[in-house]
Image: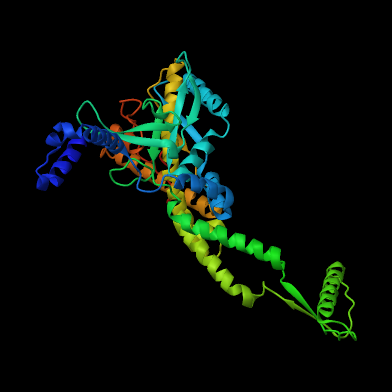
Amino acid sequence: MFNFIKRIFNYIAIGAAVTFDSFSDRKSSNKASAVFGERLKLDEDYFDYVNPSYPIESVKLIKEFVLKTPNLSQAVKRMLTLGNTGLTWEIEGVSDSEKAKIVSEIESFLNARSGIVNKLLRQVIISGALSAEFVPSLELDKVEEIQFIPVDKVKFKKERNEAGYYSFTPYFQNSYGYQLLNPASYTYDAIETDEDSPYAIPLFLSAIPNMKASHKITENTGSLIEKWGLLGFITLIKKRPFPAAGQSKKEYEDEMMKHLVSIKKSFEENRNTGFIAAFDDTKIDHHSIASSDNSNGYEKIYRSVEEQMASGLDIDPALLGRTYSTTETYAGMAYNAFISKLNNIRTPVKKFLIKTLTFHLRAMGYNFKTLDCKWGENYAIDKTQTATAEKTFEEAKKAKIESLILLYNQGIIDNNILANELGYEKPTSQTPIAKPAPMPASGKAGLAVPFQY
């Protein structure tokens, strides 16, 4: 970077027959060159740090809107509810008894950190990345704690490694400057990034303008209700009395003002009782601000803002409880697309938990080959349809097994291929499976004894 700025300076100074070297060598410009050199050094250090393509303060803004905006809060809660389907742990390279001990230790670790999976999912949903590290104990015999690092406090620096290639190194920005984060324990896993940028793009970034509009509409609605009431406002009109003989104009106006204040106070005290007494010169009218004619434009504006916000959140309005002429078939399609998105959100959480618990278990002395986990089944939008699909799947699986065994019995495939096709690495025994005897004819026509597998 320094050489690049130096070349720029030389190029600009060609017309004045001044180069960077000659400029810095002049005794008359010692002070200026020193200041200029310091500035270049600062620029060099500055350009080493990579900046995101959006204001990093947006992450904080989204966090605030999640707490203040009902639609955004509902979207996050719905993602958490549908996204956290539970985890099933798989351990390879150990006996069944040892596996039970490891699973028990994993459950104890997670139970001691109540809600840790939801916290990790929430960070990914709001910030667009998982940013956390596990903290080993001083004796390095377990993981002591899981520490969250705010995404908006992570700064990346472009550094050259030993092989001569550039890589992005994460630093934590605190009140003392920048602290290097240990890649062995720290994880920054973004769902979506710009090209040649390590910074995560928040999932709700494009919805911020509509969040502000929605918040403004809600505030204005509250102000109208506070000012006019929920059902509108009432006007009370009385005929103006004639001035008394010899009464001045000011005295008459003061008397009329006191008269109106007295009428208003009396009306406010009695309207809640449902009974109002007045003379025949009094006219009372109610003006609604919530009628269909008056609120139609408001509903269109608010619906438009909600739809644009839903697009920015990448959530169909149907999943937020808004009908908007949504059919049952379309709702099912929107739900399936939403579940596919949740799979992407869950991936960083799964990877971080595997990394953390692998270190924790090995530090505690457990020996195993690999540790993996799977999320539970997604919630079904239609249980009857899901049950039918599962039944169809089981029937197709059964037919496939019968077909493979038939191919084996006919000598087309061996037991190694049979095991692989059924999802096993290899057969438990290399001894060929005994082939069934020919079907004996029964005493009745059309009946035969079935094969026994």
Kindly tell me whether residue 443 is visible in this rendering: no
Measured from the top left, where is residue 67 in percent x and y?
57, 47
Q: How many marks overall? A: 0
From the viewer's perspective, is 255 left or right of 417? right
The answer to whether residue 273 is above or below residue 338 is below
Say which quarter of the image contains residue 416.
top left
Coloring scheme used: rainbow
Q: Residue furthest front?
A: 28
Q: Nearer the viewer, residue 377 or 133?
A: 133
Location of residue 367 in the rendering, given as x and y in whole percent from the top left corner? 41, 17
Question: Where does the N terminus fall, quadrant-wise?
Answer: top left
Front residue (pair 8, 180): 8
Is 21 above or below relative to 141?
A: below
Residue beneath the point at 33% across and 34% down: 419
Q: Residue furthest top?
A: 139
Q: Nearer the viewer, residue 426 or 166?
A: 166
Q: Is residue 450 above or below residue 72?
A: above
Whether residue 268 is visible: yes
Across and down, in percent, residue 313 comes to 47, 54
439 relative to 42 in the view: left or right: right
Q: Quadrant of the C terminus?
A: top left
Q: Residue at x 38, y 48 (%)?
A: 54
Residue at 65%, 61% in the rendered image? 222
Depth check, front residue: 126 or 342 = 126
Q: Is residue 191 left or right of residue 11?
A: right
Whole-percent x and y of residue 268?
83, 68
